[in-house]
Amino acid sequence: MKKAWLYLGLAYALSWVVLIPLIRAHASEEVLIAGICGPSFAAMLLSRSGESQPERFRRAAWFLAVTLAGWLVLIFTTGWRDAGPHWPVPIKAWLILPAMLPAWVVSGVFSQDSGIRGLLCTLLKPANWRWPLIAALCMPAFLLVPAIVAHLFGLPIKWPAHQNSTWIYIAAGTVKFSYNVLFAGVLEEPGWRGFLLRRLQGKYSPLLSSILVWLPWSLWHAPLDFGGWVASSWILYVQIRVIFQVPLTILCTWIYNRSGGSILAAVLFHAGFNTFPFILPYAPAMYALIFVWAGYVIVKDRMWRPIPGKLNSCPEHFSSIPTPPRTTP
């Protein structure tokens, strides 16, 4: 647990020391990415083992590829933010700098340090691909199925902003989802789920561990929230960070555990709940079903019980983490 506390202090320090001055200086969203990377960077720093092996070529190749992908995503994100999807999009060379941050995390799968490789291995190499796919499709299904039912019964539907064509709508949604994968999920989930949740579940049940992750994860957003980027009022803050983030945290734990400890699955689910409510139609009255969903997985997986063993396909990194006691069904 000592490392969990150390992680929280380092994650907050790496983020808040950067975010607070930038927000006060009215920096752009792309510049604020320099502070959002705190959770993942803290986890990588604390996971260093000192044991190394040569992986330079593959790490360099992945770093360059993800940097280029992130740069393109930022170019389209900034170019389409005010005027909507249009062509041509202005090229901003400086955006390659924030694109390097998620690239550094992703390429860490091939780090020379075995501890960092162990932390991040499931970001590119999950135990299976079924649960990352489920994680990516969960939120679209959760929004669209109740919306169809609500439409049949004449309940109001919240529709996304109108686009000129289907292809432009798909392009805008793809850019938004890609942005949230790289600049939200990748910069946060290796820390909150891959580092903190795993250690908490070595001592506590998944349900209690979820609550213990929810509180610092929620408070970590405070500079962004009260800087006007997310929750612009106390009512909205409570709605986002308490009412809805609690069940979302439980669902993140459920997906992470069900996927065998896949950070990729957590990243895709995180990107999904950051993206799809803004680009897909949904019935506001049916959004409360998220509590039913969270309650179902708690009961179905008996999340009040400790998990029976480890959840990772890279055991060399987690050999020092206590294994939860096994329980009989």
Image (spheres, helix red, strand yellow):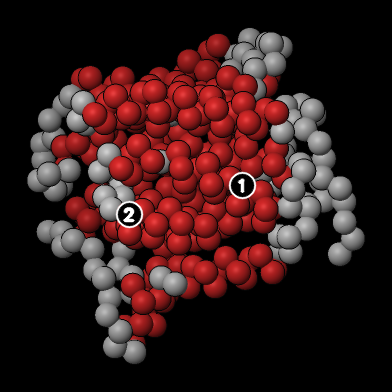
Query: Quick one: 21 or 323, which is closer to the camera?
Result: 21
Quarter of the image for residue 110 reads: top right
Q: Residue at x 69, y 47 (%)?
A: 260
Q: Amino acid at mark 1?
A: Leu
Q: Is residue 66 left or right of residue 256?
A: left
Relative to the observer, which residue lies in front, 14 or 159?
Answer: 14
Left or right, residue 272 beside residue 133: left
Q: Earlier in the sequence, mark 2 or mark 1?
A: 1
Indicate the quadrant containing the N terminus: top left, top right, bottom left or bottom right: top right
The quarter of the image holding the C terminus is bottom right
Query: According to the image, label 2 marks what residue?
Result: 234
Q: Is residue 245 above or below residue 124?
A: below
Q: Which label lies toward us, 2 or 1?
A: 2
How far across and down, in percent of the image, does residue 134 sit? 54, 57
The residue beneath circle 1 is 212
Q: Is residue 236 visible?
A: yes
- Numbered mark located on residue 276 in the image: none
Q: Residue at x 64, y 23 (%)?
A: 47
**x and y, in percent, of residue 106 in the image:** 50, 28
Where residue 51 sits: x, y (%)? 71, 12
Asked if residue 122 can be seen in this view, the reply is no
Q: Image point 31% across, 19% down: which residue? A: 97
**Compared to 28, does 251 lie above or below?**
below
- The x, y position of residue 103, in whole percent, is 43, 25
Q: Is residue 326 toward the left or the right of residue 242 in the image?
A: right
Label 1 crowding class (10 Å Cα cut-off): few <14, some 14-19, many 20+?
some
144 sits left or right of 47 in the view: left
Q: Gap between marks 2 and 1, in whole Å? A: 22 Å
Secondary-structure class at tag 1? helix
Q: Amino acid at mark 2?
A: Trp
Give the number of callouts. Answer: 2
Q: Please report the residue visible at 35 percent of the width from the left and 37 percent of the height from the top.
A: 223
